[in-house]
């Protein structure tokens, strides 16, 4: 990267989430104040491979604070999959005379950033995922919005479940960790919450539902994270497909779970898969503020020359941590929090 130029690139990679635009806005505003020309890279690493960019100025980030998604677009392109793409990426960095890059993303995007830092690029990371499973930060933006959407859905399922005396299964996102399920489940008063961290014991689930019926509660709300899996001995499998990045495309466990609950308990069961509803739309105040604070701090790290770091929320402070530490391990659900949820099971 050119040492003399003052060009700052910014990109968003991986699954979108509410709060990306507040980060882009904050990065642009603070970077312009810091004397940078800001270059938006379209569609994550794909845009850096293809040289697909847009200028970011005060005008282009005006009005984007409340908008979901990302004005830059996103993709799950991994430049390390093909050597020729990696070479193209380095060419683009030179051609654009990028002085530094801010990469906003989750484990995949920041994993690529970690490797590129080792290859000599000047990158600061901003953690993003609705799943809240990135290590080294207490929260990622997007999570609070997703939890509120899921909580509202659970509230709505409650009234119809109660009227029809049904079991309602709500499938929420959460690939490796059940943060959304646990938090939305606690906030929405779920009767059972099933997460990837604890294999599903169908006998125990059905026993809890029957116990509720025995005490006069003839409806139940079961929240399941899409990444949850059955105990092997339950003899139940879920069909798995791969997405373009090589990850298993999740979604569908709710239906498998619902049909087993209905068969085993005899109670009428309905399933709602919230899916991408949890990722769309306007960010909550919490996510707008967190995204804004992350964006400002990321530019300050660039100005301070602290490349290879990632902004992070620890307690109520925004601090810098090494990017590689954030991608090296997963932050799974705090067992103490899940124990609190379990007190209300059944
Ligand atoms: O990582 C965030 C996430 O929303 C996961 O919860 C989910 O499994 C995945 O992305 C879905 O990705 P896609 O948008 O490719 O369907």
Image (spheres, rainbow, N blue to C red):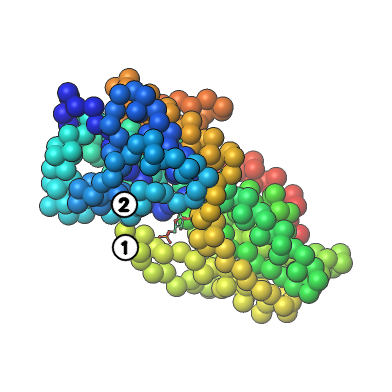
Residue placed at 19% from the left, 51% from the top? Answer: 50
- State the image quarter where residue 345 is shown: bottom right
Helix, strand or loop for disc 2: loop
Going from the N terminus, do you reach mark 1 or mark 2 first? 2
Residue placed at 53% from the left, 54% from the top? Answer: 281
277 or 63, nearer to the observer:
63
- Give the quadrant of the C terminus: bottom right
Q: Position of residue 178 (x, y in %)?
A: 55, 52
**Dot 1 alpha-carbon crowd within 10 angstroms: few under 14, some 14 to 19, many 20 or more:** few
Instruction: Say whether residue 273 is left or right of residue 304.
Output: right
Tag 1 and tag 2, C-beta contact below 8 Å? no
- Ligand 1 contact, mark 1 (Cβ < 8 Å): yes
The answer to whether residue 90 shows anywhere in this view is: no
Q: Position of residue 39 (x, y in %)?
A: 28, 39
Q: Which residue is mark 1?
A: 244
Residue 43: mark: 2
């Amino acid at each position: 990267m050119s040492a003399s130029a003052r060009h700052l690139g910014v990109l968003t990679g991986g699954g979108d989430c509410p709060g990306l635009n507040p980060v882009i806005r904050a990065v642009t505003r603070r970077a312009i104040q810091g004397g940078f020309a800001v270059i938006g890279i379209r569609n994550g690493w794909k845009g850096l491979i293809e040289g697909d960019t847009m200028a970011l100025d005060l005008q282009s980030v005006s009005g984007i604070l409340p908008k979901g998604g990302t004005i830059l677009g996103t993709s799950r392109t991994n430049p390390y999959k093909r050597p020729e793409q990696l070479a193209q990426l380095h060419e683009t960095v030179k051609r654009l005379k990028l002085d530094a890059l801010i990469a906003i993303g989750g484990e995949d995007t920041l994993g690529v950033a970690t490797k590129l830092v080792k290859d000599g690029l000047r990158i600061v990371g901003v953690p993003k995922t609705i799943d809240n499973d990135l290590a080294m930060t207490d929260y990622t933006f997007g999570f609070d919005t997703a939890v509120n959407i899921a909580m509202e859905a659970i509230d709505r399922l409650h009234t119809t479940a109660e009227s029809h005396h049904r079991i309602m299964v709500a499938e929420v996102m959460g690939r490796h960790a059940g943060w959304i399920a646990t938090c939305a489940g606690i906030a929405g008063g779920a009767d059972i919450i099933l997460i990837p961290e604890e294999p599903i014991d169908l006998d125990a689930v059905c026993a809890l539902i029957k116990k509720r019926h025995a005490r006069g509660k003839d409806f139940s709300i079961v929240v399941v994270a899409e990444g949850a899996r059955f105990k092997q001995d339950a003899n139940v499998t879920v069909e798995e497909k791969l997405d373009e990045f090589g990850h298993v495309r999740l979604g569908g466990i709710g239906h498998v779970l619902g049909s087993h609950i209905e068969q085993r308990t005899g109670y009428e069961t309905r399933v709602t898969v919230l899916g991408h509803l949890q990722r769309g739309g306007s960010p909550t105040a919490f996510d707008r503020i967190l995204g804004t604070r992350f964006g400002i701090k990321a530019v300050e790290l660039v100005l301070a020359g602290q490349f290879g770091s990632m902004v992070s929320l620890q307690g109520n402070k925004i601090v810098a941590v090494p990017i590689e530490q954030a991608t090296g391990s997963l932050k799974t659900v705090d067992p103490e929090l899940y124990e609190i949820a379990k007190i209300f099971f059944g």
